[in-house]
C-alpha cells in the first residue's frame, strides 16, 4: 500500500545511504539516488544508472513524492509567477517565483493552512489542515525551477503556514535543499519568516544555521499586537525581543522585522518611535510593507503619506529601514490568496 511505503524524498543523503546499505547496496548508490531525486524524477524507473533488480526493490519499499501543477498565473508587470500545486492527498499549496536583480527567489509554503489566526492574513482563514513534509517543501522549489526554467538562487519561507510550527520538517527541508549533491542553495540565500513563536526561535538559534530570520512584528506595543496576532497572548513582545536578541548573539545574523502598515491601527508617530527603539536594541532591520487588502477583514493599508512619515520617524530615530516593493499584485501574489480563491471556486 502507498501509505505504508517510506517517503524517500524526505530522507537525507546519509539516511538513503543507510537504507541502501541495509539492502546490501554499496554506499555510493545513496548519492546516486539522492541526485536523481533532486532532479525531479517522478519514478524509480527513470533512474537509468540503477540495476533493474534494485529499481524493483526500491519501488516496493519507497515512494517518490511529487507535485502536480494545478494553476499558474504570470504577472504582466514584473514577471512574478504564482503556482498552485496539488499535493498527493488533493490539498493545494501556493509557491511564488519572484525575479529580482540579485537572482530568482521562490517563496514557499510550509503548511496547508495556518493556525496562528493573524487577523490580516488570508492563509489562516480556514485554519491548519496539515504540515508539509520536507519532500513537499523541496518539491515546491524544484518543480518551480523545472516548470519556469529559471534557476532558483534564493528561498523565502513566507508563503502559507508558520514554518516554526512545523519545526522538524522545516529543518530537514533546509538540509535537503542545502545539500551539495542536491539543489545546493546556500543558507545565506534562505530567509525564514515567523509570527514569533519565541521558544522555537530559541531552538532555531541552537541549530545555528546561517539563514536570515524575519520576525513578523506588525506592532510595537502589546495591546495592538494582541489584537492583530493571537500569538502575542502566548509570547508577548518582551519575550519575543529577548529571543531575538539571543538569536542575534548566538548566530551573528541580524534579524528583520516585518511590519505591514495598517491604516489607523499600527501607523502612529508614537508606534514608529517605539518600533525604532525595539529595532535598535537588537540591531534589527525593519521592512515596511503596505498591507495587502484582504476582503474578509476590514483592514486598509496606510496611505502613502503616512507610510512616508512613519519611515522618516524611523530614520530620525536611527533605525535601519526599507519599504518593501510589492511584486505580483495583479496576480494575488500575497499569502493564501490564490489557494483561497481556488477553494471557493472563484475565477482565477
Ligand atoms: N507565518 C509566517 C510566514 C508567512 S506570512 C509569518 O507570520 O511570518 C509572510 C508575511 O506576510 C508575514 O510577515 C505576514 O505577517 C505577512 N502578511 C500576511 N498577510 C498580509 C497582508 N494582508 N498584507 C501584508 N502582509 C501580510
Image (cartoon, rainbow, N blue to C red):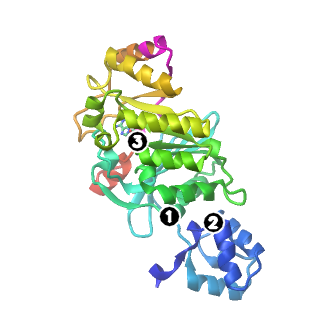
The mark nearer the N terminus, 2 or 1, is 2
Q: Secondary structure at mark 2?
A: loop
Q: Is mark 1 within 8 Å of ligand 1?
A: no
Residue drawn at x 27%, y 36% is 226
The mark nearer the N terminus, 1 or 3, is 1
Q: Is mark 2 within 8 Å of ligand 1?
A: no
- Asked if residue 228 is positioned above or below residue 10 in the image, the reply reads above
Which residue is label 1 attached to?
Answer: 67
Q: Nearer the viewer, residue 56 or 187?
A: 187
* Marks 3 and 2, how far apart at CA: 28 Å
Which residue is label 2 attached to?
Answer: 12
Q: Where is residue 320? Give x, y as percent.
A: 52, 21
- Please give the range of residues in magenta: 313-332
Residue drawn at x 50%, y 15% is 318
Residue drawn at x 63%, y 77% is 44
Which residue is label 3 attached to?
Answer: 196
Magenta run includes residue 290: no
Q: Is mark 3 within 8 Å of ligand 1?
A: yes
Q: Where is residue 192? Give x, y as percent.
A: 51, 44
- Asked if residue 17 is positioned above or below residue 212 in the image, the reply reads below
Please tell me in which quadrant of the rendered image residue 139 appears: bottom right
Q: Where is residue 145? Give x, y as percent.
A: 60, 53
Q: Nearer the viewer, residue 142 or 193?
A: 193
Q: Is residue 21 left or right of residue 176?
A: right
The mark nearer the N terminus, 3 or 2, is 2
Q: Is residue 238 left or right of residue 230?
A: right
Amino acid at each position: 500500500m502507498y501509505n505504508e511505503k517510506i517517503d524517500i524524498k524526505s530522507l537525507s543523503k546519509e539516511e538513503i545511504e543507510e537504507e541502501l546499505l541495509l539492502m546490501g547496496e554499496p554506499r555510493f548508490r545513496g548519492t546516486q539516488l539522492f541526485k536523481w531525486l533532486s532532479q525531479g524524477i517522478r519514478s524509480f524507473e527513470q533512474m537509468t544508472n540503477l540495476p533493474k533488480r534494485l529499481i524493483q526493490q526500491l519501488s516496493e519499499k519507497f515512494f517518490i513524492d511529487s507535485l502536480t501543477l494545478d494553476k499558474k498565473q504570470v504577472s504582466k508587470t514584473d514577471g512574478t509567477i504564482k503556482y498552485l500545486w496539488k499535493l498527493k492527498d488533493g490539498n493545494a499549496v501556493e509557491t511564488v517565483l519572484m525575479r529580482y536583480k540579485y537572482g530568482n527567489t521562490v517563496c514557499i509554503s510550509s503548511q496547508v493552512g495556518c493556525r496562528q489566526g493573524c487577523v490580516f492574513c488570508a492563509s489562516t482563514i480556514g485554519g491548519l489542515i496539515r504540515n508539509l513534509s520536507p519532500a513537499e517543501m523541496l518539491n515546491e522549489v524544484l518543480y518551480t525551477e523545472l516548470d519556469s526554467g529559471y534557476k532558483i538562487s534564493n528561498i523565502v519561507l513566507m508563503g502559507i503556514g508558520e514554518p516554526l510550527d512545523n519545526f522538524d520538517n522545516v529543518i530537514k527541508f533546509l538540509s535537503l535543499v542545502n545539500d551539495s549533491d542536491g539543489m545546493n542553495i546556500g543558507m545565506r540565500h534562505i530567509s525564514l519568516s515567523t509570527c514569533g513563536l519565541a521558544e522555537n526561535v530559541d531552538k532555531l538559534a541552537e541549530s545555528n544555521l546561517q539563514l536570515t530570520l524575519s520576525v513578523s512584528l506588525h506592532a510595537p506595543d502589546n495591546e495592538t499586537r494582541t489584537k492583530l496576532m493571537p500569538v502575542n497572548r502566548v509570547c508577548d513582545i518582551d519575550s519575543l525581543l529577548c529571543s531575538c536578541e539571543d538569536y542575534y548573539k548566538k548566530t551573528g545574523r541580524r534579524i528583520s522585522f516585518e511590519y505591514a502598515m495598517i491604516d489607523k491601527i499600527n501607523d502612529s508617530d508614537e508606534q514608529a518611535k517605539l518600533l525604532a527603539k525595539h529595532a535598535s536594541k537588537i540591531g534589527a532591520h525593519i521592512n515596511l510593507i503596505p498591507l495587502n487588502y484582504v476582503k474578509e477583514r476590514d483592514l486598509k493599508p496606510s496611505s502613502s503619506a503616512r507610510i512616508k512619515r512613519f519611515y522618516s520617524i524611523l530614520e530620525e530615530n536611527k533605525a535601519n529601514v526599507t519599504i518593501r516593493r510589492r511584486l505580483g499584485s495583479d496576480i494575488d501574489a500575497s499569502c493564501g490568496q490564490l489557494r483561497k480563491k481556488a477553494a471557493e471556486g472563484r475565477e482565477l
